[in-house]
């Protein structure tokens, strides 16, 4: 076993009687989650005794138990977003070479599938947590992340990387066992999952909500004396619009997942919210930079300083200092699963080429200018245009397609598609969404359409995405 895995297991054993997670009216201790992991291990032994376990679930307790199952059993946990369509899920299961699928809802898959209903984790109350003696150290997590090619890539994260990320986050945020973290972000994302890892590291208590609802979150903040909260900008806007107020116990509102509009940050600060802007990505196991609430108040455009032990640099800067953000950190992925070329392009001499654009302030704080080229970040969800374009081109009415992200007050960005239709064809936005229902998750569906006889091109013969985005400028404001 690796030193990091040893440390995580030692911490898990020490925390066994401590409360770990509350879901609704049910509170789980770390020991109960660990025993649930043992029951899941016994369930899966016939199909994946030491293999890759895919998880597609909305129940945070099941996610936590599956994480401990992977940690105890020296297995790899593959997290799939529960909102994926069956076709999307199948592609990732095949790419990940999963041995079985664990879920809390009906989900057909061409491999052994086990459905564990919410609340059924007590099944493991008498089980003994196993400790694997398997040689080697497979990645603890395989998380699919976005890029510019339209092909989802599985970032391989080791226990060492994940523990280093939790350690650095704890030092920056000064979290401890007296903290209560309200988790309302998807646990299939690194942003949500990292809360569980911080809880294991610090012994803090997680109050979980599988779905974000502004009124429910606002009530829980006060009722549960929450001290920490993670949100994406869309969630923060909804909270402010609902008139929510921060409880006196709240120390940090960690705001990330998408570029935060400075005016939204100022509005939240004026309402008394202790906003701490952050920049991170899956390939670095979440946080890379994080500002303190005081730093955010002084400069709402900043994403803060690198975490302890992390380094940033800007390569190929323009005259205004904006260039590509690169990161060196102990939490970096080992690579992309089955993607040697993509891995070589992303990792070089200990540095991760993020593809994001930013500049550094004189004191070393990062100002993020733009996320990855062409990437659309809508409501905290990463969406790659090429995937949507490929789906659009399968429709009989569509000859060519270009997808871009447009500014949206509510979502940060909204998906928009410029289409070249086949002769005599017609297509409405409603018909298009209906046609995509089986192939793309709803958050990937275009919210605006423009039709054109030919897509604009650059001098090199590529589709000119800037011209496409400009063509939407006269369209009604996106929502």
Image (tube, rainbow, N blue to C red):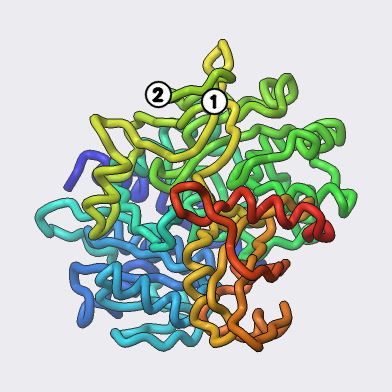
* 381 lies left or right of 327: right
- Kindly identify which residue carries mark 1: 322
Q: Residue at x 38, y 24 (%)?
A: 309
Q: Position of residue 350 (x, y in %)?
A: 27, 31
Q: Position of residue 289 (x, y in %)?
A: 52, 30
Nearer to me, 336 or 103: 336
Q: Secondary structure at mark 2?
A: strand
Nearer to me, 231 or 385: 385
Q: Is residue 260 above or below residue 303?
A: below
Distance, label 1 to label 2, CA atoms, is: 17 Å
For residue 40, what is the image quadrant?
bottom left
Q: Is residue 465 above or below residue 161?
A: below
* 37 lies left or right of 172: left
Q: Pick whichever of labels 1 and 2 is earlier in the sequence.
A: 2
Q: Residue at x 55, y 73 (%)?
A: 83
Q: Residues within 10 Å of mark 2 (few under 14, many from 20)?
A: some
* 307 lies left or right of 419: left
Q: Quadrant of the C terminus?
A: bottom right
Q: Residues within 10 Å of mark 1 (few under 14, many from 20)?
A: some
- Kindly identify which residue carries mark 2: 311
Instruction: Please name which of the two marks, 1 or 2, marks the residue nearer to the observer.
Output: 1
Residue 122 in view (yes/no): no
Q: Secondary structure at mark 1?
A: loop
Q: Is residue 456 above or below residue 15?
A: below
Which circle marks residue 108 in the picture?
none
Q: Position of residue 72 (x, y in %)?
A: 27, 58
Nearer to me, 141 or 312: 312
Q: Is residue 358 above or below residue 246?
A: above
Q: Residue at x 66, y 44 (%)?
A: 229
């Amino acid at each position: 076993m690796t030193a990091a895995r040893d440390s995580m297991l030692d911490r898990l054993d020490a925390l066994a009687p401590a409360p770990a997670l509350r879901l609704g009216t049910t509170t789980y201790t770390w020991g109960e989650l660990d025993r649930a992991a043992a029951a899941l291990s016994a369930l899966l032994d016939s199909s994946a005794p030491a293999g890759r376990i895919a998880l597609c679930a909305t129940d945070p307790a099941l996610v936590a138990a599956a994480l401990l199952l992977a940690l105890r059993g020296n297995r790899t946990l593959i997290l799939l977003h529960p909102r994926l369509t069956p076709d999307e899920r199948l592609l990732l299961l095949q790419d990940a070479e999963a041995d079985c699928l664990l879920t809390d809802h009906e989900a057909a898959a061409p491999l052994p599938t086990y459905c564990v209903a919410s609340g059924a984790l007590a099944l493991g109350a008498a089980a003994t947590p196993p400790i694997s003696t398997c040689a080697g150290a497979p990645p603890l997590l395989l998380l699919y992340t976005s890029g510019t090619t339209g092909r989802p890539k599985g970032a391989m994260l080791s226990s060492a990387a994940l523990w280093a990320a939790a350690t650095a986050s704890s030092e920056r945020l000064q979290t401890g066992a007296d903290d209560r973290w309200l988790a309302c972000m998807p646990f299939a994302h690194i942003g949500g999952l990292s809360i569980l890892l911080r809880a294991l590291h610090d012994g803090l208590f997680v109050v979980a909500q599988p779905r974000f609802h502004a009124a429910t979150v606002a009530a829980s903040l006060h009722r549960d004396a929450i001290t920490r909260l993670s949100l994406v900008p869309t969630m923060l806007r909804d909270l402010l619009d609902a008139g929510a107020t921060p409880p006196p116990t709240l120390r940090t509102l960690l705001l990330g997942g998408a570029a935060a509009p400075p005016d939204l940050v100022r509005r939240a600060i004026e309402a008394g919210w202790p906003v701490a802007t952050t920049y991170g990505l899956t390939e670095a196991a979440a946080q890379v930079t994080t500002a303190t609430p005081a730093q955010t108040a002084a400069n709402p455009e900043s994403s803060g300083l690198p975490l302890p032990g992390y380094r940033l640099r800007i390569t190929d800067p323009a005259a205004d200092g904006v260039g590509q953000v690169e990161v060196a950190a102990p939490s970096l992925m080992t690579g992309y699963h089955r993607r040697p070329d993509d891995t070589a392009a992303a990792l070089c001499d200990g540095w991760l080429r993020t593809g994001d654009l930013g500049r550094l302030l004189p004191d070393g704080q990062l100002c993020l200018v733009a996320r990855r080229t062409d990437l659309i970040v809508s409501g905290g969800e990463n969406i790659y245009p090429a995937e949507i374009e490929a789906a659009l081109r399968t429709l009989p009415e569509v000859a060519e397609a270009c997808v871009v992200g447009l500014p949206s007050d509510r979502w940060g960005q909204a998906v928009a598609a410029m289409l070249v239709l086949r002769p005599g064809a017609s297509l409405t936005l409603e018909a298009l969404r209906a046609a995509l229902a089986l192939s793309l998750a709803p958050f990937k569906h275009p919210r605006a359409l423009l039709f054109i006889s030919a897509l604009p091109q650059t001098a090199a013969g590529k589709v000119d995405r800037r011209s496409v985005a400009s063509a939407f400028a006269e369209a009604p404001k996106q929502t």
